[in-house]
C-alpha cells in the first residue's frame, strides 16, 4: 500500500499547477511592486460642488449632541409630530362624520 501512494505522488509531480486567472508575468509584476500594473498610485481628489445657500446658515449644532445625533433627533421629532397631527385630524373627521358632533 505505501508503494502505491508513493507511485501516485510521483504522478502528481508531473501535473502542471492550475491557472488561477492570471498569467505568470502578472504574478511577478504584482509581487515586485505590490500593485497591479496600470493602476494609479492614489485616487484623485473628488471635486465637491459649492455650498448651497441653505448650507451656509443652517447648521445642526446642539451643545450636548454631535451633528449626526442632532439631525436624527430633529428628524424623529418631525416625523412623530406629522404622525400625531395626522391622527388628530383623522379622529376629528371620524367624530364629526360618525357622531355628527361639530368640533
Image (cartoon, grey):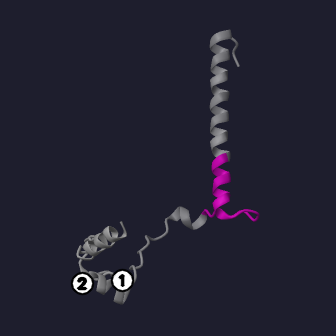
Residue 90 found in image quarter: top right
Asked if the stretch drawn in magenta spans residue 61, the answer is yes
Q: Return the disc, 2 or 1, that comes first in the chain's sequence.
A: 2
Residue at 33% of width from left, 71% of height from top?
3
Q: In the rendered structure, find residue 25 and report the number of the disc placed on it.
A: 2
Q: Is residue 84 above or below residue 55?
A: above
User: Residue 48: x and y, percent?
Assistant: 44, 72
Decide which of 103, 83 is in the foreground and name it: 83
Q: Secondary structure at mark 1?
A: loop
Q: How many marks?
A: 2
Q: Quadrant of the N terminus?
A: bottom left
Q: Quadrant of the C terminus?
A: top right
Q: Secondary structure at mark 2?
A: helix
Asked if the stretch drawn in magenta spans residue 78, the answer is no
Q: Nearer the viewer, mark 2 or mark 1?
A: 2
Give, as a single range, the part of the protein colored magenta. 58-76
User: Residue 53: x and y, percent?
Assistant: 51, 64
Q: Residues within 10 Å of mark 2 (few under 14, many from 20)?
A: few
Q: Judge from the rendering whether residue 63 lies leftward or rightward of residue 69; answer left or right.
A: right
For this orientation, the residue located farthest to the top is 99
Q: Residues within 10 Å of mark 1 (few under 14, many from 20)?
A: few
Decide which of 86, 45 is in the foreground and name it: 45
Query: CB under 8 Å between callouts 2 and 1?
Result: no
Decide which of 67, 55 is in the foreground and name it: 67
- Cα distance between the residues tagged 2 and 1: 13 Å
User: Residue 82: x and y, percent?
Assistant: 63, 38
Q: Which residue is mark 1?
A: 35
Q: Judge from the rendering whether residue 86 lies leftward or rightward of residue 41; answer left or right.
A: right
For this orientation, the residue located farthest to the right is 64
Amino acid at each position: 500500500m505505501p508503494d502505491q501512494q508513493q507511485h501516485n505522488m510521483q504522478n502528481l509531480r508531473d501535473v502542471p499547477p492550475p491557472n488561477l486567472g492570471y498569467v505568470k508575468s502578472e504574478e511577478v509584476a504584482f509581487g515586485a511592486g505590490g500593485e497591479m500594473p496600470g493602476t494609479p498610485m492614489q485616487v484623485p481628489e473628488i471635486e465637491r460642488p459649492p455650498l448651497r445657500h441653505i448650507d451656509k446658515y443652517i447648521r445642526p449644532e446642539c451643545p450636548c449632541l454631535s451633528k449626526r445625533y442632532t439631525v436624527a433627533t430633529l428628524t424623529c421629532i418631525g416625523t412623530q409630530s406629522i404622525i400625531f397631527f395626522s391622527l388628530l385630524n383623522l379622529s376629528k373627521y371620524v367624530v364629526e362624520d360618525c357622531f355628527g358632533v361639530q368640533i
